[in-house]
Image (cartoon, rainbow, N blue to C red):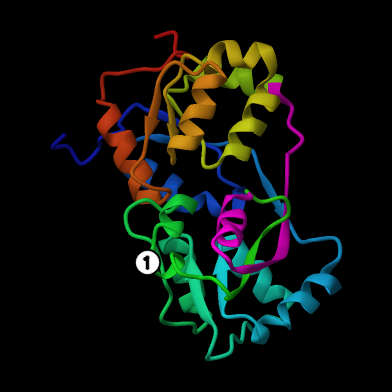
Amino acid sequence: MGTSKPLAGVSVMVTRPAHQAAGLCHLIEKGGGTALRFPTLEIEPPKDLDHVSKVLRSMDQVDWLVFVSVNAVYYAQKACDNRLNIPRHVKVAAMGRATERALFDCGIKGIVVPEGRYDTEALLGLAEMGHVAGLRFLIVRGQGGRPLLGDTLTQRGADVGYAEVYRRCCPSVDIESHLEQWQRYGVDAVTAFSGESLRNLVMILGRHGMEWAVCVPLIVISERVAGQAKANGFKKVVLAENASDSALFAALSDLFDPEQHGIFDDR
């Protein structure tokens, strides 16, 4: 748009977990906008940490380790006494660039990462994931993660196991006070970073909150979440190029100019 402040006057609800929201919030504020921190997921360690540690100690018996998120790297490292020592013969894949950077910070190199969209479908589309019959995979993820990756690798003949190194929880929120604030100051866009974060958002907002929210542009990071959003009644769903902070900021910048205001704004 040719302006250094593409989000001037724009308020954006950021639903990333609190410890992962700083990057996008910084970009929004640097772009002239207001970042409204409203995490719809909390990330916690597993209840049975000993079991997780035992599973990770068997990583020398697999051919591939697949880390699905930055949280997977962080909590796997914690479960390994803060030292993620991956045997040389084990290949490593990451779902996206942020996860790759987290692994690199642990001293791990030669990581396989999809290009463009950073999701399960893109990872499964890599040549390395096409001929996996007889190979052993350990997928490092949160509890109850999306089954597509493991199911598809199994269908392709791989032996798949899981190290579920963290739990995703829905925060307890006093939604009425938030709704009053949003109606007073305005909300111009909402972000959703996964199917679960969107599901929790809908649950937290409730019927009254959703009456407002469905009229606010929703920025999502995958076609799957876009479909989920539309099924929940969101009227304007914008698909970011991928899940990175820069891609979400670009989608927001393309959406707004300084004169636009949101559904919660009475100006």
Residue at the spot x=43%, y=36% of the render? Answer: 223
Residue at the spot x=54%, y=62% of the render? Answer: 156
109 or 27: nearer the viewer: 109
Does 162 lie within the magenta span? yes
Circle 1 sits in a helix, a strand or a loop, which is it? helix
Across and down, in percent, residue 240 comes to: 36, 39
Across and down, in percent, residue 249 comes to: 34, 42
Q: Residues within 10 Å of mark 1 (few under 14, many from 20)?
A: few
Q: Amino acid at mark 1?
A: Ala
Name the quadrant containing residue 28: top left
Name the quadrant containing residue 163: bottom right
Residue at the spot x=25%, y=33% of the render? Answer: 254
231 or 4: nearer the viewer: 231
Q: Quadrant of the C terminus?
A: top left
80 or 16: nearer the viewer: 80
Across and down, in percent, residue 19 comes to: 60, 54
Q: In the image as oriented, which residue stretches furthest toward the left?
A: 2
Residue that numbered label 1 is attached to: 127
Q: Point out the stretch of residues depicted in magenta.
A: 147-175
Residue at the spot x=42%, y=71% of the render? Answer: 112
- Looking at the image, residue 152 sits to the left or right of residue 266; the answer is right
Does 68 lie within the magenta span? no
- Looking at the image, residue 82 sits to the left or right of residue 93; the answer is right
